[in-house]
Image: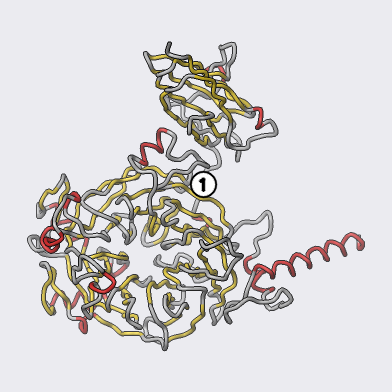
Amino acid sequence: MKKKLIPALSGLLVGIVASTVFFADYTNVGPKSVADTSTKSNAEKVYVPFGEQDEYYLFASGGHSGQMFIYGVPSMRHIRTVPVFSQDSATGYGWSDHTKELMGDYTWGDLHHPAFSETKGEYDGKWMFATDVANSRAAVMDLETFTVKDILDVPNTSGPHCAMFVTENTEYMFLPTRFAVPFGSEYASLDEYSSKYYGVMSAVQFNEEKEELGVSWQVALPPWSYDLSDAGKGPSHGWAVVTTYNTEEATTNLEINASQADRDYIVLFNWKELEKMVADGQYEEVNGQKVIFPEKHKGGLYLVPVAKSPHGVDVTPDGKYFIASGKLAPAMTVFSFEKAFAAIEAGDFSGEKYGMPVINYESVMEREVNPENALGPLHTQFDDKGMAYTTMFISSEIVKWDPTTGETVDRVPVQYSPGHSVAAEGDSVSPDGKWLISLNKIAKDSYLSVGPSHPESMQLIDLSGDKMEVILSAPVNPEPHYAQIIKADKLSPIEVYPKDETNPDAVYSQDQTRIERKGNEVHVYGIAMRSKFIFDAKAERPDVIEVNEGDKVVIHLTNIDFDEDITHGFAINRHDLNMEVQPGQTETISFTADKAGTFPIYCTNFCSALHQEMTGYLLVKPSN
């Protein structure tokens, strides 16, 4: 036994030493030598042995890829890319009938700011929401299957950048807009910007039973740009906050012209009051939507002055404060909900903008926090001890500080220019406090060069000690626009789709397979199984589909391998078609057989030892 044990221990030691190549100590920014053993404990912290699994899921937005990236934490292993707003040839997303319908007229999207559904301010592990800045859409993902259930075209808006930020019990997702436009994006001269352009905010609700998103009502906010947002909780339940910039209403060269004033605003609104106003008929109908105009329908909307060009606004876990930072200012400001409510009650206002009272800054401000030499504060997350963590874009660091005193507790450099950060359940009512991930906009020399286009980086930071410690850097491309971390045990993904005998397109046995002609339409009810397709078991060649040129072909394919991880693909050569069918799932793909010929059909997803043999033919008879 001893002779066998020694080589095994030697192999383990080699593995541990070798792992130090991939981990660096970023408390002093710069690479470590392989011989440096100071990072062994860091490697152990993120090491998830084979057979064990990560404690958390990380859902990171895929930006202009239009996809959602799923990682395990603390290993930072990329587990899955889930297509949401863009086509994905790996899964056939955007080619199958259902996903093509979801995509509508678009082939790509710009996914920003994912948000989990919540119950009593806690992530409940049921749904994930996200927005598409490029095409003004919102999506909902089912966390049982990690698939998109609905995509909503949001009317009267342009670019919901801020996030589908979710209220405490998922009553609403609010979508303010980044780009002010006229209603319906109709033409209007930029000379009429202040009178005909609006930054519409949409109150979106999710019907869980029907799995559908819908706009309940909207608010015609001024023609400013609306950035990030957050919902109140606990004592601030029913309220929410949104940052603004370009309150100068510049229409060109925003870098200069939108940076003239000393301050911008946070929109503080009472969504319960606005909801009641709509119920009472205090709205106008615009393009089929119920729209509140603050100048005409008074109440529920207030402005709080904030340092210039704010990005993040974040509500503390106890719901007592909201924190905002101006990108061009070196300070974070802690605002008090209680003070804001008192100011509103007392009419403590300094003026009005577009019908919305402006609360006196001194009346709502709790304290200003100025960490020495910390520049470019953007976004704040929280731990389980009441500490706040703010990204500093310009000075490339994370600053840990106490919101109740303003004291800077710790700071750590990151590589480089962090935008957002995400802590373990860090914007819920009970953050875990174990991990923080810095979502960096620039990687520069962090990884092997792959040409001019560099990946961005996500750096895992250990929060368990008195001092923050960067212990792992993972590349990501493109960089995420916010992310959320959820405990793995809150999710219960299915491994196999259950049989659905009510689905008219599903077939679960060979004798149910058939090909039916309905005029110029051919419907195929087939199965995929290791390692063959069967389209009509009664035919001489059951794996062949024969149609006429010009026919519309509709293929309903059911994967009857009710076995975990046995996914089949379906593609037709020279037809630009592909879809993925999970175990137990039925998917449909439609096309017009507009060219005569012989076209092989094959499984695109490796499924068995005889995967290569899993083929068939589409035979298209010439029309003449």
- For the residue carrying disc 1, how many other residues have a C-alpha within 10 Å: few (<14), some (14-19), or many (20+)? few
Above or below: residue 544 compared with residue 192: above
Q: Quadrant of the C terminus?
A: top left
Quadrant where the N terminus sits is: bottom right
The colour style of the image is: secondary structure
Question: Residue 51 in the image: x percent, y percent?
Answer: 68, 54
Name above or below for residue 110 compared with residue 104. Answer: below
Point 44% across, 15% down: residue:
548
What is the quadrant of residue 30 in the picture?
bottom right
Q: Is residue 350 left or right of residue 270?
A: left
Q: How many marks?
A: 1
Query: Which residue is under mark 1?
Result: 493
| Residue located 42% across and 47% down the image | 84
Instruction: Decide: is 350 above or below 173.
Output: below
Q: Tell which residue pokes out farthest to the bottom in this image.
A: 372
| Residue 510 seen in the figure | yes
Residue at 58%, 20% in the rendered image: 543
Circle 1 — which element?
Answer: loop
Front-most of residues 367 and 266: 266
296 to 305, vertically: above or below: above
Corner quadrant of residue 13? bottom right
- Where is residue 514 drawn, in percent x and y? 50, 16
Q: Amino acid at mark 1?
A: Pro
Please, which residue is most extreme toward the left here? Answer: 296
**Residue 52, image x, y percentages:** 65, 56
Residue at image location 42% in from the left, 83% down from the top: 374
Can residue 390 be seen here? The reply is no
Rendered location of residue 195, percent (x, y) = 10, 61
